[in-house]
Image (cartoon, rainbow, N blue to C red):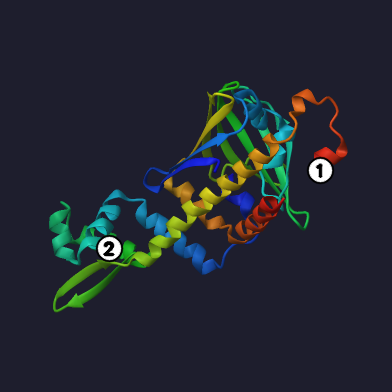
Amino acid sequence: MTVKDMTKDPANLTMRVTAELAAPVERVWQLWADPRQLERWWGPPTYPATVVDHDLSPGGKVTYFMTGPEGETFHGWWHVLAVDAPRSLSVEDGFADEHGVPNDEMPTTTMSVELTADGDRTQMVMTSTFESQEDMDRLAEMGMEDGLREAMSQMDAILAD
Amino acid sequence: MVVRLMTAQRPADESVDQMDRVLHALADPTRRDIVRTVVRAEHSVSALAERFPMSFAAVQKHVAVLERAALVRKRRVGRTQMVRADLRALGAVHELCDQYETLWRHRIDRMERLLAEPDPATTHHRTEEERQR
């Protein structure tokens, strides 16, 4: 089991995931730092991600879009708040319109990742924080039940490999 | 950007509205305290007003928000309004948290799969086949 701990704290609008990954820190960092790698795990299999801009420096932007089964696209962006390669990354994570222009009306979350070496393995702690309860409300509005079912069937396929 | 990516379709509007009401209701610390209090035992609105230093009217207002979110139910006993928790609505919030959990579990599964592949940093030319895998 890769995921070691999952702390959900709705009252404080945060969620923390701790995972142990079977690779050194530098290699795990590449999952975030290499746009081609990022594309392959960020979105669910039915909504593959395409990373457009990828500047992982403080103040930098990462932009991407995901393509749905009917060709519809969903755009998103990260605004890099802090980066300490290959150990930590903190970004503001938000939505954009179909032209990739950040949508200020939509809620953002702050996502922080910390990588710690554990022998030749890596402990990854990912913390997501909602900006406000209002944002959490609006994210909840979007729902995702069907997407989840898709992801689960994909998971079964991976496990059957 | 977490939830949207998972969205294939929006759930039925009623359930969206309902989750909205629940999250809005629970955004306020006093209302969270009221829910905690009435989970343990049914209280009258006046007992709640004594317990939380605020007016009867203020408590009534909070209770009304909680009632609209279906987090509490009210019943009248003579001239007294009794409030008790209705925990079914809390399920929606837990569900949101569960969805985040599932999302990240899946992302981490995908990460693991990638890590099991040859390191692209040491592979100069990745073939199209590898890209698509």
* Relative to B80, residue B16 above or below: above
Where is residue A69? Give x, y as percent.
75, 57
Number of other residues with Cα within 10 Å of mark 1, as a class: few under 14, some 14 to 19, many 20 or more? few
* Element assignment for label 2: helix
- Residue identified by numbered label 1: B132
Label 1's element?
Answer: helix
* Residue A86 coordinates in the image, percent (x, y): 60, 22
Q: Work out whether B124 lies above or below A146.
A: above
**Residue at position x 67%, y 49% in the image:** A44
**Quarter of the image where one finds residue B39:** bottom left
Marker disc for residue A24: none
Kindly indicate the quadrant of the structure image that contains residue A84.
top right
Give the residue at mark 2. Answer: B63
Name the quadrant containing residue B89.
Answer: bottom left
- Pick whichever of labels 1 and 2 is earlier in the sequence: 2
Closer to viewer: mark 1 or mark 2: 1
Residue B51 position (above or below residue A105): below
Foreground residue among A137 and A29:
A29
Q: CA–CA distance between discs 1 and 2?
A: 55 Å
The kind of residue on which mark 1 rests is: Gln
- Percent x, y for residue A130? 47, 42
